Image (spheres, rainbow, N blue to C red):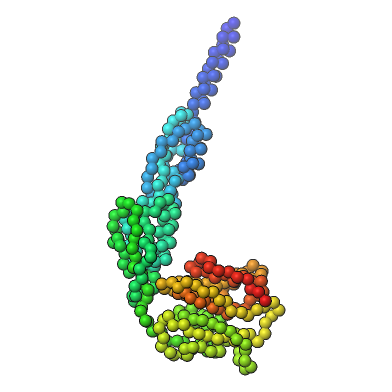
Amino acid sequence: MVSLIFVGIIAVVVFFIAVKGAEQTLVPDVVGKELTEALLELQVKELYPRIQLRYSQDSTDRGSILEQEPQAGNIVKAGRRIRLVVSLGVMLNRVENYIGRNIDEVRAEIQNFTASSGGQLIKIKEPIIYDYSPDAPGTILRQKPEPLTDISKPIEIELIVSQGLENALITVPQFTGLTLSSALEQIDKTGIAFEFSIRERIEGERGETVVWQSPPADTKISSNTVVEFIVSIPPSLNNGEVFKLFTYTMPQNPYPLPVRLQAVLPSGENKRLFGVDFQGGKFTVPYKLTEGSTLILTMMDKELYREKVLP
């Protein structure tokens, strides 16, 4: 009888120890994790969140846990509330100073901030106003509201942007006699407006060479005057190779923007053909490539057009 009572007491003690053990749980480490992931981990441990929201210094923090209390590793009773501080991202409370910066960089910065913050507190008013200025094209000259203006609600910012000098004169370099690759390099350096055409090679001429230009070298022209070039075709081509003129007409921009022409060869290799700051209009470039290659034209790293190289 005594032994039965003793066994019963031990069973009761073991039961209460088991119950008491089930009430204890280990606080998980959720700092740096996304809120949904943190809530799932707390649920598994039978813990409940008490959420606080706070702005942080890094836009990439938005929606993640900045702090927790109690700290990870503490043993607490199941059912306890765990304080979680959740990031709202960066708070933009003043208009920045954009004067002197490039409009394309500022536009990308505002778009990135909008995407990371989840809301549009500030946007650029369209259309942008352009004005002639000695500052480099694309430079922000003035802005409204002024820098450091407090932001209490979503606003549009008006920007006046440099279009470069009005009627700026440049001297046409000597292109006649240059190989095509040298001519393209010179165009990239000088930034002149250009238009190419190609023709059969005349006896005595080198192939893939500029054989004519207009206006001629040393002529003074305005910066938007188109210089025309004629390039002779190569004397011979490898099997499956073509020499043609790439042509694409772009809309006019307020000032020149980075344009790149590249090719993806049938082997999958990427080949850069030409890069220049181009304002718009007819974009023409002679090229020598293997049939089946793909020509890709981009502006500011965004694809505008592509075509297959055919026989």
Residue 171 at x, y percent in the picture: 42, 87
Residue 64 locus on image (x, y percent): 45, 45
Residue 280 position, x and y percent, is 47, 74
Up-down relation of residue 228 to residue 54 (above or below): below
User: Would residue 157 appear left or right of 286 to someone viewing this image?
Assistant: left
Query: Measured along the vertical axis of the image, is residue 2 above or below residue 84?
Result: above
The residue that appears at 52% across and 26% down in the rendered structure is 22
Picture quadrant where residue 168 is located? bottom left
| Number of marks | 0
Q: Which quadrant would residue 234 be assigned to in this image?
A: bottom right
Q: Which residue is drawn at 39% across and 68% down?
A: 102
Check the picture and name the quadrant holding the N terminus: top right
Q: In which quarter of the image is the C terminus?
A: bottom right
User: Which one is in front, 174 or 83?
Assistant: 174
At a point 51% along the width and 77% down the height, the residue shown is: 282
Residue farthest right in this picture: 239
In this view of the protein, which residue sits in the foreground, 222 or 34?
222
View extreme (top): residue = 1
Q: Which residue is drawn at 48% across and 84% down?
A: 227
Residue 57 appears in the rendering: no
- Decide if residue 292 is in sight here: yes
Q: Which of 229 and 288 is in front in this view?
A: 229
In percent of width and height, residue 199 lies at 60, 86
